[in-house]
Image (cartoon, rainbow, N blue to C red):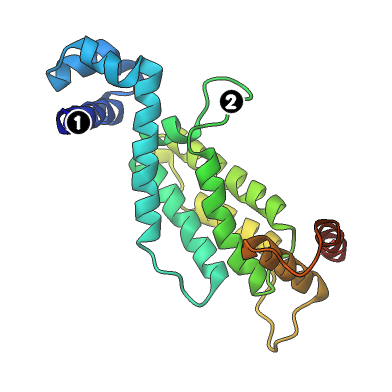
Amino acid sequence: MDDVKAHTRQRILAVAADLLENQGAQAVSTRSVAAAAGIRAASLYQLFGDKDGLLAAVAVQAFNHYLAEKRTVAPSTDPVEDLRRGWDAHVGFGLRHPAVYLLMFGTDRPGRRPPAADEAHRLLLEFLDRVAASGRLRVPRALAAHLCQAAATGVTLSLIATPGPERDPEISAIMRETLIGALTTDPTPDSDPALAARALALDAALTAAGEPIALRPPETALLRDWLQRLAR
């Protein structure tokens, strides 16, 4: 029975995603999805509760596909270039799947975080940790992450809203390079980065360690405060 339910669930999600991509959010209803999937509406309600539950599940599945795409790109020796490639992958996914992107990264009311926000933030921090560890991050990674998410999402939504013939493919690249120029430093010719970049690199290392260090919590907090001050 579990296998049957899992198969039915996947069929429903596939049908809902297809309707969303080809006909828009207005075409997705519990009745239309159930009919297209060849099941009773009651079966859909048992699995997803209601339309909101169904759309949330579609968003989660779409984000899993989004992550899978981004993880097919192996990290290079240049973390800033990887940040650039991550931006391009994000925008490219949105332009290939505009309706799904709106579901993943949009929100239907103020103050509500979109379904993909937390995991997208975590993935972005991984990119920024590598930039900080290389000594090339100009600002605290939390601020850098917020700016990256706001810029990439804003550009993608703007391009989605622009009719194809009017869409300028250079907009994304210009915004990307402007942001990266503001957030990162140029590679240094030697192994002695600027003090601020070194402080941010150590702060990122403390965050990414995931294990207790040889300092008490108040001492760790004080050290991180000093590092943030040195980075300003």
What is the secondary structure assignment of the residue under circle 1? Answer: helix
**Above-or-below relation of 208 to 192:** above
**Above-or-below relation of 214 to 31:** below
Residue at screen point 48% across, 58% down? 86
**Above-or-below relation of 44 to 211:** above
Residue at screen point 40% across, 34% down? 163
128 and 153: which one is in front?
A: 128
Dividing the picture into quadrants, the one containing residue 176 is: bottom right
Q: Left or right: where does residue 162 sit relative to residue 112?
A: left
* Residue 162 visible: no
Pointer 1 and pointer 2: residues touching (CB < 8 Å)?
no
* Separation of marks 1 and 2 at Cα, in angstroms: 33 Å
N-term-proximal mark, 1 vs 2: 1
230 and 49: which one is in front?
A: 49
Image quarter where the C terminus lies is bottom right
Determine the residue located farthest toward the bottom in the rendered image.
Answer: 190
* Amino acid beneath label 1: Asp
Dividing the picture into quadrants, the one containing residue 60 is: top left
Q: Position of residue 226 (x, y in %)?
A: 87, 63
* Marking on residue 108: none
**Above-or-below relation of 131 to 106:** below
* Residue 147 visible: yes
Q: Position of residue 179 (x, y in %)?
A: 64, 56
Q: Position of residue 26 (x, y in %)?
A: 34, 16
Residue at screen point 16% across, 22% down? 37
CA neighbours of label 1 inside 10 A, class few (<14), some (14 to 19), many (20+): few
Q: Which residue is mark 2?
A: 112
Q: Left or right: where does residue 47 sit relative to residue 216?
A: left
Q: Which residue is mark 1?
A: 2
